Amino acid sequence: MKAFMEEVKKNKALFVMAAPAVLLVLVMQYLPMSGLVLAFKNYRYDMGVFGSDWNGLANFSYLFSSGTGWLITRNTILYNLLNLITSQMLAVLIAIFITEMNGKIFKKVSQSVIFLPYFISWVIVGVFVYNIFNYETGLMNGLLTAVGLEAVNMYDKPGAWPVIICIFNSWKWCGYNSVIYIAAITGVDSEIYEAASIDGATIFQRIRAITLPSIKPTIITMLLLQVGRILRGDFEMFYQIVGNNGQLYNATDVIDTYVFRSLMQNSNIGMTAAASFYQSALCFIIIMVVNAVVKRIDADYALF
Amino acid sequence: MIKRTKTLKRLLATGMAAIMTAGMLTGCGGGSSNSTDSSSGQESSGAESAEAEGGEAAAGELDTSKEVALSMYVISDRPAGQDIVDENLNKILKEKLNCTLKINYIGWAEYANKYPLLFSSGEEFDMAYAASWLNYPSLAQKGAFMNLDELWPTYAPDNFAAAPEAAKEQATVAGHYYCVPQQFATTNAYGAIYRKDLVEGSDWDGVMETFEDIEEYCDIVKELHPEIEPLDQYSAAPEWSLTYMRHQGYNALAEGIRYLWYDPTEENPKVVANESYEKMPEFLEMMARWNEKGFFTKSALSDTDSQKFQNGKAALRVHNIDTYRGQAILHPDWGVSYSNFVKNLSHLPYTQDCMVISNTSKNPERAMALWNLITTDQEVYDAFMYGVLDVTYTLQDDQFDITDKDLYGEGAMWAARTNELNRNPVGTPEEFDIMKAEFEETIAANNTAEKYSAFVFDTSTVETELAACNNVWQQYWWPLELAYTDRETGLAEYAEKMKAAGLDKIMEEAQRQLDEYTASH
């Protein structure tokens, strides 16, 4: 405690600067956590959050009663891993391409075009998807029948949807993510590149030996930050692309969409809290594990 | 430097941990003391208020010497002309009841999240819209609304006297009134809304009474107008099995439970599940044929266009008679017609639109008196529902016409409608009133089904099973109903998943409640 007071005295200005952020986190993130007790309660409006009766784990049972709990947990984790890896890899690739480009105007234009999907709302993307895959009037079947092939009913093939969702996710996010990598690459000392080209290194050798190692810390930090979101499936994306189509649920259902559907019709606050509690707990475990692994490999890269 | 940041981090971490534990401790502590307080407090306050009200009632009239400002929550998007309507209404209310009313809107985009929170936030307001589709019974059971046992008969005596017995019974949850139900008779009539102009010039026989007739009609539409989808089906729950079951004389167990059925004309109705109903294979075979013939798109469950009939992209949809009227007014040249498919007609629960008073209301007596006024006085009702005469609406032979839809349509407090005060919109087809009268006659002549119109399935003990079953129903039944999945293996899979989700427990509970209801009525 004494050491802490000394610390405060020494870095007064720094603590004052940090105070608003710490307060914000306390009020917005830590205080509401007490609401998690709702997950274990049979909520009544007239008794309030703390006055309602306890009911053990009953609120959690709907998640697991029909075996869907494991399926949606698996889907959530796999989807996020897949999306995480593909969108980050693509972002790195795009960043390298763009920085290696010479024509200034072409560079700016292509960067903007790649960035653009970020601004398109998932609602619109959902409409795109439907108009591409609609069986009777969709773009895809129009093309297929035009070249004499048989029309395909994509809504009949759940297996194809992880790929479709992954493609749309990358398309939407890679431009946005690449900005950070472009900044990281720009920060690399240009003298190293010059020295390399004088020594006769080809462009691929330069990328492999200079660019990639220099942005490795950025890549790892970005990955770690994304891991924190791994159990929060991008609800809007799944909801807008898959919507009410039950045929695809086994392949596309994530925790968020399942909970949304279950609780749309009954306003059970306890069950909602239980789902969110389950998500948070899993999330916590995953972050701890990933961080521990990173720490094992190279302590400098760990978040904490 | 590194070392120092490390210690700092550690300090921060411990600090956070300490704060969190402290938060939890106070949370728990507060919890336990609160619970005892509130439960005991409730009983006594309940007794007190009952006494107080009784005393006042004995003293007679409501004291309106003090002006009060009342507020009401409804669900809809706030119309642009609400301010003009408020001003006009408040002028009348000030004079008649010395009060003003502020109407707050919860938009369609946010009601699902915001509506339940309305009652837990502690915000002070007086009245709100409630409905069976907004879980009125379950919210009432959880103590979201004020008890109206004394308030309703005392301060809204005319409304109370006019309420049908069935309405009062439906408003009762656990032995108490928690809402004032609407007094507008609506029936469970449901059926085909279809366009006659599309089959003109063909040899269609003009009969629309059975599912064979629908198929015949669709065949002709498909042939004459291949660009139009015969049936309106988009990503919302398919209603063909619902209509089919009602056509066979069955009622759905509850509005949101369309996979359990009972026949209200049986002496002791038995709960039947989709998968065990004997005619279900026949129905699924028919749907497979319809799918094959292309009566609806093979991607319907991903189609979000909910206006296909209205925009002329589909020829037939199933819905209630009010939707039929709406479409007939919108498209007078389409020859829009309606045919009821429900075999056992009965009145819909009056609680499908109702008014509740908030626990936080400061002036429940005045709010109740206001409700009495709105539901019995044509002038107040018109100002409340239709707005300002000749500004937001005009009158033609007692039918109202909205002057500008973007300014003000119709009030969103649907629970205020009564048979006497409600007006038809201009352009209502003659058949509308004729058909409605016919439905009433049918019910009056044979009211065996009416017995169960007050039956409300109390879901509080099976909520987790219901949440799971609703999911299975959507995931496996919808594609099955539209014949996107194989009807035999699909049905078996559906049955198996339903069982795993706890359907048996729901059926058992439903049967118990039905038996209880049958015995007591």
Image: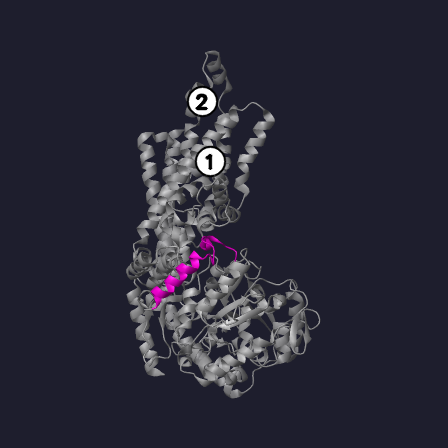
Q: Is residue B454 magenta?
A: no
Q: Amino acid at mark 1?
A: Asn
**Which residue is at the front of the view, A215 or A292?**
A215
The answer to whether residue B475 is above or below residue B508 is above
Crowd around label 2: few <14 · some 14–19 · many ≥20 (10 Å): some
- Residue A178, position as x, y percentages in the image: 49, 33
- Residue A225, position as x, y percentages in the image: 42, 38
**Which residue is at the front of the view, B366 or B355?**
B355
Q: Amino acid at mark 2?
A: Ile
The answer to whether residue A134 is above or below residue B284 is above
Outermost residue on the top side: it is A199
In the image, taking residue A69 as reference, residue B348 lies left or right, namely right
Quarter where residue B334 is shown: bottom right
**Discs 2, 1 touching: Cβ within 8 Å:** no
Quarter where residue A295 is shown: top left
**Which residue is at the front of the view, A88 or B507?**
B507
Same chain, labels 2 and 1 = yes
Residue at 38 percent of width and 37 percent of height? B9
State the extent of the magenta-drawn residues as a range. B279-308
Quarter where residue A109 is shown: top right
Q: Which residue is mark 2?
A: A207
In the image, taking residue A282 as reference, residue B105 lies left or right, namely right
- Residue A125, position as x, y percentages in the image: 51, 46
- Residue B83, position as x, y percentages in the image: 65, 66
Outermost residue on the right side: it is B390
Q: Which residue is mark 1?
A: A11
Q: Which mark is residue B320?
A: none
Q: Chain of mark 1?
A: A
Between discs 2 and 1, the one toward the N terminus? 1
In the image, taking residue B439 as reference, residue B269 lies left or right, namely left
